[in-house]
Amino acid sequence: VIFCGLICLVPVMAQQSELQVGVAGQTVTLSCRGIPHDTGVTWRYYRLLILTKGKAAMTDRSEISSTSKHLKVWDLKLSDAGVYTCDSGSRTVSISLHVFQLTISLDGHFLPKEVPKLILMQNSSHPLPHLSITLFDSNNHTVTPQLQNKTPQKYILMLKQLKATDNGTWTCHVHSDSPLIDHNITFDVKVLGFQNPDLERKYAAVDSTVTLSWRLNFQKVKWQEGFTGQLSWKQKESATAHELLDFNITARGEQHETKKSSPLRFEIPESKRQSAIEVKIPKVHFSHSGQYWCRLAYSRRYTQSQIELLVMKVSADPAGPLPSRAEVTLTCQVSSPLPPNAHLLWERVNGTQVDVKKSKQHEMEVEVNVSAAGLWNCHLMEDNERKISLHYLVEEAPGWISYMAIGASVGGSILVFGLACLCIINGISWQRRRQRAKRMARARQYLLENKTCQCQQ
């Protein structure tokens, strides 16, 4: 539990009585106003004598200043609220100490999407006032809490779901009309998480090098607790997940990583950004696409950030130089469906509007038929911004290759024609042999039948 706050001084009566506000866990100084510095004073809590000088009897949590005669109380408790009097001869100053205690759940250590709970308690020698509470986040934006429960002594408030950017010092402003109180209580909120978005998309070309990075904020928020994590990958939503590495961060901020055995060939960069988890794929394959997610675990609670790697490649069918009067089909393909605001675009360098072809929504590939040599570029566009480009050079085949292609084509046609003729001739010959065999069989049958008749005579 964290106790936080400041001190304010609000006069409630003219001359010798005043209201002073303190916050549990902090230090409060009770002023003995109008008393000459060379005059001895006696401080009392209600009628209980505290001490005239030196250390007070409040469990070693207070002392009286020898010069100002003020009473300083540190590590204030909610039970320290009440009436304090400063006596100096015939002059008495009475102070009513109103104490607030603000506690925040989970010791102020959260993960993204968690909802903090605040408990504000008050104690005073007077009837407890109705409080108006306003909260300001670390960016000084007003936050409207949900009042979960309320009694004169205790207010239970639920805040909003936190983001990693909500780290910092928050302010709880407490207001009361009677007695008049306007007091700010500050408290720290620490949110352990990623500086990446929850879901990030990264594009890479086949055979290129790509580095995936998750930037942690534990040093930025001065997180002083140890936590663990792991990095995993799977190609599809329904595919088996492969653990790539484990890591742990100590309370001192020391980072340790352990590489796991997996079908993905990757490296852990030797020089990388501070407070980051990174993997480097030196030669991207089409099969390396998929979902990569980094998971943090703290006190049996979890948060994660995901990077979707989308891989693009181009190919030609048939591959190789383009013969004269021939045609080649260029294909630009991505490894997974594109978002609605993205598309693929083939365009010929130094070409015309006719030399452009765009994929339809959600299409994973786009084809273009090319009958002339030239350089073609395939762009992956997202919100009209080029995310990645690949080029394919269609080269015109030399003349002898064209002649060879023509000759091969003609030769192939002749060969096919010859084979067809041979098949026909063989078929006719086989048919004739079959008919001749049938005639011979009938003749033998006839002779056998005639021979049988002659023997019987």
Image (tube, rainbow, N blue to C red):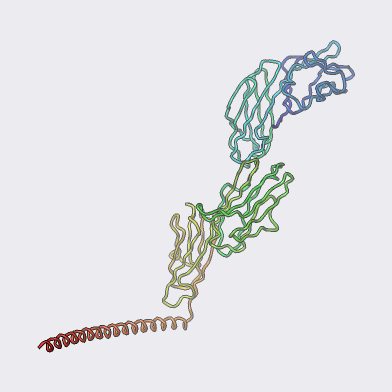
Depth check: give the residue in front, 90 or 439: 439
Q: Residue furthest front?
A: 456
Depth check: give the residue in front, 228 or 315: 228
Q: Is residue 93 left or right of residue 168?
A: right
Q: Is residue 309 left or right of residue 48?
A: left
Q: Residue furthest left?
A: 457
Q: Is residue 429 left or right of residue 171?
A: left
Residue 175 location in percent, x, y?
65, 23
Res 432 quadrant in image: bottom left
Query: Residue shown at 69%/32% (left/top)?
Result: 1
Residue 75 location in percent, x, y?
77, 27
Query: Residue shown at 69%/29% (left/top)?
Result: 185
Res 367 quadrant in image: bottom left
Q: Residue furthest top?
A: 90
Q: Please, is residue 230 above or below residue 80 in the view?
A: below
The mark total stands at 0
- Locate the C terminus and report the quarter of the image it occupies: bottom left
Depth check: give the residue in front, 105 or 187: 105
Q: Please, is residue 407 above or below residue 1 in the view?
A: below
